[in-house]
Image (cartoon, rainbow, N blue to C red):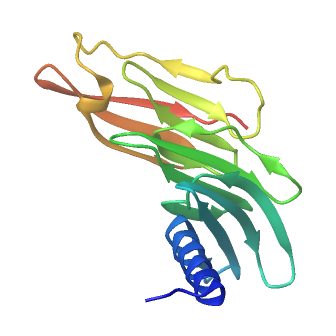
């Protein structure tokens, strides 16, 4: 059987097209906040096993790009004009970005447990301490840090419950056989 130049060229085009389909993938996602009209839109492209996503916020008339990230947010929330975008980063780890219109983007905060969007403060857990950060402060230094005595145990393994009420962060944790609680009021 003889393969002509036109068949050879067609086969080459088919092979290149099939290879590109295997190496490139585009997809989009949207997370809506029905009570506000806002949504987080994600447009992702994967080329040669590398994914890049453009993430923006939109209300239909206003759209603002927030950041580029290697994946779509695992979750998002919107409260007091602040968007929180949380990305999974492996087992027992996450990164949360805070953003608001006008180009305000807070650094990624690890393992965010609770948020006071009105006062723009996040509570972040570490292995040995609880840290509180201003959302839009470009400093890596925490606003406040509490290191409970856990007798060598990891705070991440000791946490029982967390939350916020009336601008007061609360965290319950096990210390030995006892349940302890810490509280911190977010400054204005």
Q: Residue furthest left?
A: 177
Q: Position of residue 127 (x, y in %)?
A: 37, 22
Image quadrant containing the N terminus: bottom left
Asked if residue 86 lies left or right of residue 60, the reply is left
Asked if residue 135 lies left or right of residue 123, the reply is right
In this rendering, the answer to whether 75 lies above or below 43 is above
107 or 134: which is nearer to us?
107
65 or 36: which is nearer to us?
65
Say if residue 27 shows up in the picture: no
Q: Position of residue 93 (x, y in %)?
A: 41, 39
Image quadrant containing the C terminus: top right
Instruction: Give me the residue at 43% from left, 26% from top.
Output: 126
Asked if residue 150 lies left or right of residue 55, the reply is left
Q: Position of residue 81 (x, y in %)?
A: 74, 62
In this rendering, the answer to whether 2 lies above or below 121 is below
Q: Quadrant of residue 83?
A: bottom right
182 or 135: which is nearer to us?
135
């Amino acid at each position: 059987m003889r393969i002509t130049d036109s068949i050879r060229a067609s086969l080459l085009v088919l092979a290149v097209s099939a290879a590109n389909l295997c190496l490139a993938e585009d997809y989009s996602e949207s997370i809506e906040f029905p009570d506000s009209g806002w949504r987080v839109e994600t447009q992702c492209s994967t080329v040669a096993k590398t994914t890049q996503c453009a993430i923006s916020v939109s209300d239909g008339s206003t759209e603002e790009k927030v950041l580029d990230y290697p994946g779509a947010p695992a979750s998002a929330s919107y409260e007091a004009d602040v968007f929180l975008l949380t990305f999974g980063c492996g087992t027992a780890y996450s990164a949360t970005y805070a953003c608001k219109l006008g180009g305000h983007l807070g650094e990624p905060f690890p393992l965010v447990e609770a948020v006071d969007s009105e006062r723009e403060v996040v509570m972040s857990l570490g292995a040995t301490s609880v840290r509180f950060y201003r959302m839009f402060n470009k400093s890596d230094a925490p606003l406040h840090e509490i290191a409970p005595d856990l007798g060598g145990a990891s705070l991440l393994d000791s946490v029982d419950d967390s939350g916020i009420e009336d601008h007061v962060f609360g965290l319950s944790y096990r210390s030995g056989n006892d349940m302890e609680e810490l509280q911190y009021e977010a400054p204005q």
